[in-house]
Amino acid sequence: MTEPVDELIDDLIGDLPAIDHADRARRICDAADGTTLYTDLTDVRWLTGFNGSNGWAIARCDELIVGTDGRYGDKARAETAGTGATVIVEQQAAKLHQRLVETLGDQPIGLDASSVPHATWQRLAADVDLVDRPSPVKLARRTKDPAEVARIDAAARIADAALADVEANLCGMTELDVRAELEHSMIRLGADDRSYDTIVASGPDHGARPHHGASRRTIIEGDTVIIDVGALVDGYHSDMTRSWVMGEATAEQREIYALVVAAQQAGLDATHPGARASDIDAACREVFDDAGYLDWYIHGTGHGVGLDIHETPFHSPVSTDSILADYVVTVEPGLYRGGFGGFRIEDLLLVTTPNTPTDPGYRVLTHSPKRELN
Amino acid sequence: MTEPVDELIDDLIGDLPAIDHADRARRICDAADGTTLYTDLTDVRWLTGFNGSNGWAIARCDELIVGTDGRYGDKARAETAGTGATVIVEQQAAKLHQRLVETLGDQPIGLDASSVPHATWQRLAADVDLVDRPSPVKLARRTKDPAEVARIDAAARIADAALADVEANLCGMTELDVRAELEHSMIRLGADDRSYDTIVASGPDHGARPHHGASRRTIIEGDTVIIDVGALVDGYHSDMTRSWVMGEATAEQREIYALVVAAQQAGLDATHPGARASDIDAACREVFDDAGYLDWYIHGTGHGVGLDIHETPFHSPVSTDSILADYVVTVEPGLYRGGFGGFRIEDLLLVTTPNTPTDPGYRVLTHSPKRELN
């Protein structure tokens, strides 16, 4: 049975400011054009407060309407109470579809074509004048308000504390033991859940797969180890990665680890309001390229974090996005090679408007030390 | 630090037979018409063995091709090794799309319109002759082979054991403590993970929401409590629900609980090879309707379970599906009312061909007792 850890919970979470969904609905109404249908459940949650596995929201200037099925009726009414939203509940999918069509009426309806299956779009387009329009909510979600930052910050501190508990004892544990320990610890520290399936990737094969999960492999002397872990607090995610060598590092391990540390610092140095996501990516990539290791780098450099663990903007060579103040983003270069293993270092950053010439333009939300190798 | 529990793991999981992906690819080739593109990641995993968060598969009679991004290259090659699949890896989404288009060529390509966002369908349809066709893999996935049943059965036994550990101590714990305890226990018992976010719904408000998650509410005397919990073993899910009253039950609680038990038994009795999913749903609904409680029943009666926690067929009044031998399905009626709370009872069943006149036509994979109320 789990012991209560109330003092710790107070320490790490504190009093979270309320989220003002009514204000969001007003802001989106000012920014949006006509009537918009939201089918992405994270958009629905951000806009209305309703958090279920089935539903949609309609936003017009004068009203907000949420539809869902019978399992979620009470929950949707409770969670949207502050917004004045009308809640439509139908047990049968066909009836809920019919109510949606009736509510949308004859005017053109904005819907983001990336947020709905082709079959659903086709069925709806038979009855409704759909216009493919990027979701105004998805864009607004990039900018985090203080209530959101408080949640992400608390989640990051919980993951830091959970990692601090386990990191001295990795050698001899299985990857899955480490994962279970971290996830249980985050709940005890006040998280509602893990942020995503924790990655514990050890040794020459698993360590070389950036998105390896966690297996029953026992971590042994000589291994490279990557742990990618975050917590969830009131729907908001944190995200961080740290890497280690078990025991004394070889010269090759030292060289590769130092490159990852240097690339990650280059990515941080390139982050400030107005920076292009592609430039942050290029800053990391250049360090690897100069050292002749660019083909060991097989993923993007970062992404936004909020109600989704992976949100826009994405830091990649082909991104056309810029990073603005109040975005929360990761910087997470890594190097991987089968037979060697791998390293990744990832911090979570709140982008900030610099107040002084030496202000870097971000605040690091991750506080876990980046360890020196033995 | 988690203690190793090797004897328990051996007990509950045993030796799992290997999954023969090459055989699946052959069977699907025999059943499918021309070239099929799979974008549903569970379809891709079932068919090829590749388990990642981004990718697709192409199945033609003479070949199997898997595409994914740089994070998953090594993993995809390792996981599909037994099938002879060609693996295409491109770090950039645009390049991977280009390789997909080149590989598909000029012939008509079957794609399930429900498995792909409208925006993706439109982009692909600009270069490829797409035909909307239900996924042959999705249909084949309903029928579980012995290797799949072994995994689901192990997952069900792990969830049973985890629930047995915690159920005597619910009163005084928070919902989230119960959830953390169950999920940690399942990992220690050999599960790779929980099957889904465990539901612990207690008291007059939470208990009335069938898909309430778990909160910091403390479970107290007089509460109704619903726990919906499953384990994950090698990608395969289990699913079960049990309900309790804390302390001595009231007359109303007894009446409602007895109705849920009776409805669940009626659903089991209606389950056999050839039964219509809508008839199983109707059997449960009739018990509630006869007692005047039909409006307390606000969800469907069951669903298939496999690599996804919710698969076809779905037991609802509008279903046109039948249940066949070797399907794995749930039967899970419940009654809910704000101010009262709720009860749900759910078993996981393997549908079987009856060998004798008294054989019910299913084997119950859930072994947790359905407790009598105090």
Image (tube, coloured by chain):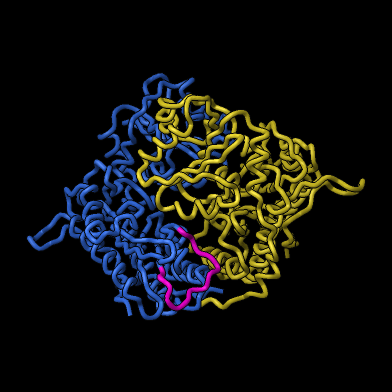
Chain colours: A yellow, B blue
Q: Residue furthest right?
A: A357
Comparing A287 with B195, the one in front is: B195
Residue A314 visible in this rendered orientation of the protein: no
Locate the N terminus of chain B by quadrant. Answer: bottom right
Residue B344 visible in this rendered orientation of the protein: yes
The secondary structure that dominates the magenta segment is loop
- Residue B371 in magenta stretch: no
Counting from the top left corner in percent of width and height, residue B150 is at: 30, 60
Give the residues drawn in magenta, as a range: B212-225
Q: Is residue A298 left or right of residue B133?
A: right
Q: Is residue A298 left or right of residue A100?
A: right
Counting from the top left corner in percent of width and height, residue A177 is at: 53, 67
Q: Is residue B101 left or right of residue B150?
A: right
- For residue A10, above or below residue A211: below
Locate the C terminus of chain B by quadrant. Answer: bottom left
- Residue B217 in magenta stretch: yes
Counting from the top left corner in percent of width and height, residue B220 is at: 47, 76
- For residue B69, above or below residue B179: above
Q: Is residue A7 left or right of residue B280?
A: right
